[in-house]
């Protein structure tokens, strides 16, 4: 259906409509689901919102790993609430994508068979409790840096979903930083765990913003359509500038020998992540890609009886209604 939908729109690309559409974007108007839109705009949104939704859902796995082993009841309750929030974010985003004419089932199938991506970061393992701190602080921190501007994105349902999501992500980042503060100010062994978590999550967090602007395939068009509000490199730099002082406050060291404040630019100079590792993770070869997809496929298979039951109930109800009419 997704492929059909894209094809059936091919006839609509008339230059006048395209110009009027771009004028609306340039004037800062929101585009709503029933408005005319170029097929590329619709396709880009389905790809980006779908990937984003999948990231929220797959992102529950590395943290879900620690719910049963949280060090206190309070930490467990907080982590549980955070993981539930991520499920909610996934649902708002699937709903936003559905307004573009794709179904949630279609998106899910494309995730499960590898046709759609999710954020590279969730293919890294969470080895210690300190990783819950690093994920909240760095991963949710990077997500917010990317998502705050997306509150102003041109597609109405996506923009509105982002407003709620950003509020919750701020809480997530604070809970992560709070864990890091406790660990960094704890025993030498706890501080070492916090440093180790920062060492392992620093570069994968920088990768979350996507490839460098030179290598980014979609940025130029997405920014012209205001689907994206900033380039990947702009957001990565903002993230580094914001996070380095936070690491210093914790008494931890960012694992980058080239990290240096640059008076001239007013920004930190920093080392780029290993981009060959990034592209390898995207190809499915990260430390946890197989495990993550296997977990989502298992959840889908295990939930079949629920979906079948709900569908049978809905069909029965509809048949009863028809018979009564
Ligand atoms: N992980 C996986 N794939 C990535 C990626 C990443 N970190 N960064 C880029 N890519 C992929 C792109 O999807 C694209 O592949 P495709 O053409 O097959 O879809 C390719 O690499 C080239 O990258 P581009 O820069 O051209 O791609 P985009 O213009 O889409 O930019 C993006 C990438 C900045 C991630 C953008 O899609 C975006 O802003 N997305 C919305 C935010 C989002 O998805 N965030 C997920 C973060 S995790 C999260 O929110 C969960 C929370 O709980 C922490």
Image (cartoon, rainbow, N blue to C red):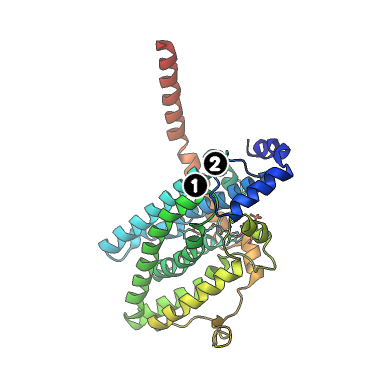
Farthest left residue in view = 73
The span from disc 1 to disc 2 (Cα, nearest Å) is 8 Å
**Circle 1 SS class:** helix
Q: Estimate the x, y position of residue 106 in percent, counting from the top left.
A: 57, 40
**Residue at 35% across / 83% down in the picture?**
188
* Secondary structure found at label 2: loop
Residue 253's place in the image compared with 103, above or below, is below
Q: Is residue 154 left or right of residue 21?
A: left
Pointer 1 or 2: first along the chain: 2
Examine the rendered structure and indicate whether residue 104 appears above or below residue 182: above
Identify which residue is drawn at 40% across, 54% down.
164
User: Mark 1 — residue?
Assistant: 157
Q: What residue is disc 2 on?
A: 33
The disc at residue 58 is: none
Residue that extends furthest to the bottom in the rendered view of this protein: 263
Question: Which residue does the image show at 57% across and 41% down from the upper left?
Answer: 100
Whether residue 115 is visible, yes or no, is no
Q: Quadrant of the N terminus?
A: top right
Give the residue drawn at x 41%, y 49%: 88
Vertical comparison of 149 with 310: above or below: below
For this view, does 21 lie left or right of residue 157?
right
Q: Residues within 10 Å of mark 1 (few under 14, many from 20)?
A: many
> In front here: 221 or 180?
221
Looking at the image, do the residues carrying marks 1 and 2 touch, with CB atoms under 8 Å apart? yes
Q: Residues within 10 Å of mark 2 (few under 14, many from 20)?
A: some
């Amino acid at each position: 259906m997704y492929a059909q939908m894209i094809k059936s729109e091919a006839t609509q690309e008339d230059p006048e409509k395209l110009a009027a559409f771009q004028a609306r974007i340039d004037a800062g108007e929101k585009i709503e689901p029933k408005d005319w839109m170029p097929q590329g705009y619709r396709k880009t949104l389905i790809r980006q919102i779908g990937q984003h939704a999948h990231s929220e859902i797959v992102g529950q796995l590395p943290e879900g790993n620690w719910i049963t082993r949280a060090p206190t009841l309070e930490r467990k309750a907080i982590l549980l609430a955070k993981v539930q929030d991520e499920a909610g974010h996934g649902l708002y985003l699937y709903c936003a994508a559905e307004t573009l004419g794709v179904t949630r089932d279609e998106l899910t199938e494309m995730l499960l068979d590898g046709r759609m991506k999710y954020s590279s970061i969730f293919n890294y393992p969470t080895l210690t409790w300190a990783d819950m701190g690093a994920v909240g602080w760095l991963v949710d921190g990077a997500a917010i840096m990317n998502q705050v501007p997306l509150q102003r994105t041109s597609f109405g349902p996506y923009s509105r979903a982002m407003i709620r999501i950003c509020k919750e992500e701020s809480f997530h980042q604070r809970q992560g930083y709070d864990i890091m503060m406790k660990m960094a100010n704890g025993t030498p062994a706890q501080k070492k765990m916090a440093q180790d978590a920062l060492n392992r999550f620093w570069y994968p967090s920088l990768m979350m913003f996507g490839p460098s602007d030179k290598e980014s395939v979609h940025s130029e068009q997405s920014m012209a359509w205001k689907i994206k509000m900033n380039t990947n490199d702009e957001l990565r730099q903002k993230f580094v500038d914001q996070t380095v002082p936070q690491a210093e406050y914790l008494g931890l060291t960012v694992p980058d020998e080239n990290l240096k404040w640059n008076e001239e630019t007013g920004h930190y100079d920093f080392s780029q992540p290993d981009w060959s590792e990034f592209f390898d993770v995207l190809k499915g070869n990260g430390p946890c890609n197989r495990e993550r997809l296997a977990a989502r496929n298992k959840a889908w298979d295990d939930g079949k009886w629920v979906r079948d039951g709900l569908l049978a109930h809905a069909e029965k109800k509809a048949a009863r209604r028809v018979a009564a009419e």
